[in-house]
Image (cartoon, rainbow, N blue to C red):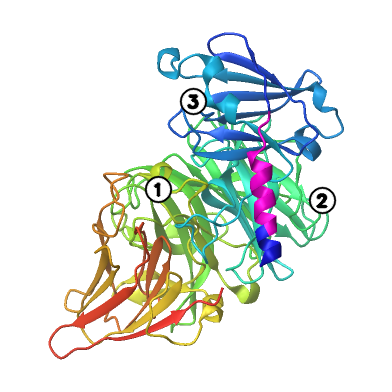
Amino acid sequence: MKKSLLTLLLAMVCCLAKAQVSPDILSDKHAMLRVTTTEHYLLLPVEEKAEWAHLRVLNRNNTVRTLNVRLAVDKVDYFVPLELNGGITAQTSNSSTLLDIHFNGDRRAMGALKELACWKEMRYANTFDAQNRERLRPLYHHTPSYGWMNDPNGMFYKDGVWHLFYQWNPYGSQWENMTWGHSTSTDLVHWTALPTAIEADGLGAIFSGSCVVDHENTAGFGAGAIVAFYTSAGESQTQSMAYSTDGGRTFTKYEGNPVITSNIPDFRDPKVFWHKETQHWIMVLAAGQEMQIYSSANLKQWSLESRFGSEYGCHAGVWECPDLFQLPVRGTGQQKWMLVCNINPGGIFGGSATQYFVGQFDGHRFTCESKPEVTKWMDYGKDHYATVTFDNGPQGRRVALAWMSNWQYANEAPTKQFRSANSIARDLDLFTDGDETYCGVTPSEEMLALRGKPSNKLTEACEVVVSLKGSTNIVLSNAKGEQVVMTYDAQKQTFSMDRTKSGNVSFSENFASTTTAPTHGQLKQLRLFIDRCSIEAFDADGRMAMTNLVFPSEPYNTIKATGTGTNKAKITIYPYNL
């Protein structure tokens, strides 16, 4: 305890040491700052309402990094670290490092450049404190240690380790400066943050993509090499690749990038997998309002095989983040293919969501078994998007993660040091209801290991199992009167979640909402995964999933379930051992 307190105090003292910066003000929008320190970081003060400032890092007169950051004008919301020694200024002296800063704000609103708060608060430090201290930061969901996160990227499993890459802004908690962040886990719950994996280059920012384990060395980078595919977002969107020979810790960009180009504006998010029957790699790309399917023998040269989607499903927004894989159909011994298509906007409850199609794939063309007008949603909450699955999963498992937010309000969510989390891991399969085949979504088995002894006390990080006997209302609430109301209607076979009074809903007019899902039969047991700012509801049989964010002013500490007539629901609470 004493050691932890001392560490905290030292970190605080370190952070309080001012940088003594003396910028050269060159115009009402232009300044330069010479780096004069041997410390590891320059802590940049951020004010989220400020306009973006464009910052170039020059070393020995060459630009080594560019970034956009909302440098504080009036006050500081939080700090972000700009790495100096061991990073952008490695093997050079600090005296040769220059920051060239252009401010985009209106001078009349911004005031005199020399008076900005950023110069007074800018700090040098040897450490950056990214501890999990925000009241609303989840306890058992993956989050970035700081900064903004959106789509999960490049997920793969190898040698007992789950690798998660993600769209990351290291210089603020709003979307910008897209790179690939990197975290690893051995249990899909506890994650370790690793250094940035893939950074922007001359071809553009690093948008979403995927990784594969090249077991047979088809690309020539070595047997077992990890090969990443991502969208280079420059003037146009093109597809690039990088490879890793150390298990995904570091990547080398392929010198022949880009490997695929197009004149389509929204052309991105390559998902690659090995197709055993044709002995080829397959890539699915989101291309405007359709998916394009490519094949390759060596991961370098790609041929367009087919297109899908121009008349199928929902087209109310841009198609993004595809995935394509084979799944078993429960109780049949059959296998079918499922094509995942994330869409924004156009989600069933507004904003972004994950739709999918079920059918067959022969290595060249995907054929959907449903009628074109049929739209199927993987999750019926507002906060489940950019869903993709891990490559090389153990025991043939198809494990998915989603970004737990919605583009309608993601940049305004009421957190500061970080923004956004991933959903819990989910195993996917297929089931039938009537003439249609649907995606089954079940919390991954790793979640069971978190359960403590059953309790009658609700905690801010727990799983709640509700055994149902007919229609039931379930209410989560706290002493402030904030509540989430969940309703199962056995007759209509629907489940709904009302978060209109859940806590802070004022930050966006699109947040307060009620979401409703079909249950595809009678709901007998409900599993609720409650964390500080989220509720994920699942039918225990995996026929319904719903993910919604909540921002209560204090944790919910009461849960009540009321059945109709003589029906009574049984509630079991499992506090989580984290």
Q: SS at mark 2? A: loop
Residue 235 in sight in this render: no
Residue type, label 3: Val
Boundaries of the magenta span = 6-19
In the image, 367 versus 356, the foreground residue is: 356
Q: Residue at x 26, y 62 (%)?
A: 482
Expressed as whole percent of the image width and height from the top left, the position of residue 539 reads 36, 76
Is 365 contained in the magenta span?
Answer: no
Q: CA distance from mark 2 to mark 1?
A: 47 Å
Does residue 155 lie above or below 566 as drawn?
A: above
Location of mark 2 (residue): 220
Does residue 97 lie above or below 266 as drawn?
A: above
Between disc 3 and disc 2, the foreground one is 3
Q: Does label 3 or label 2 sit earlier along the sequence?
A: 3
User: Could you say which disc has been placed on residue 234 in the image?
Assistant: none
Location of mark 3 (residue): 73
Q: Residue at x 47, y 73 (%)?
A: 443
User: Label 2 near label 3: C-beta < 8 Å?
Assistant: no
Q: CA distance from mark 1 to mark 3?
A: 21 Å
Is 9 contained in the magenta span?
Answer: yes
Location of mark 1 (residue): 414
Q: Does label 1 or label 3 sit earlier along the sequence?
A: 3
Number of labels in the image equals 3
Q: SS at mark 3? A: loop
Considering every residue shown, the one lying at the far right of the view is 91
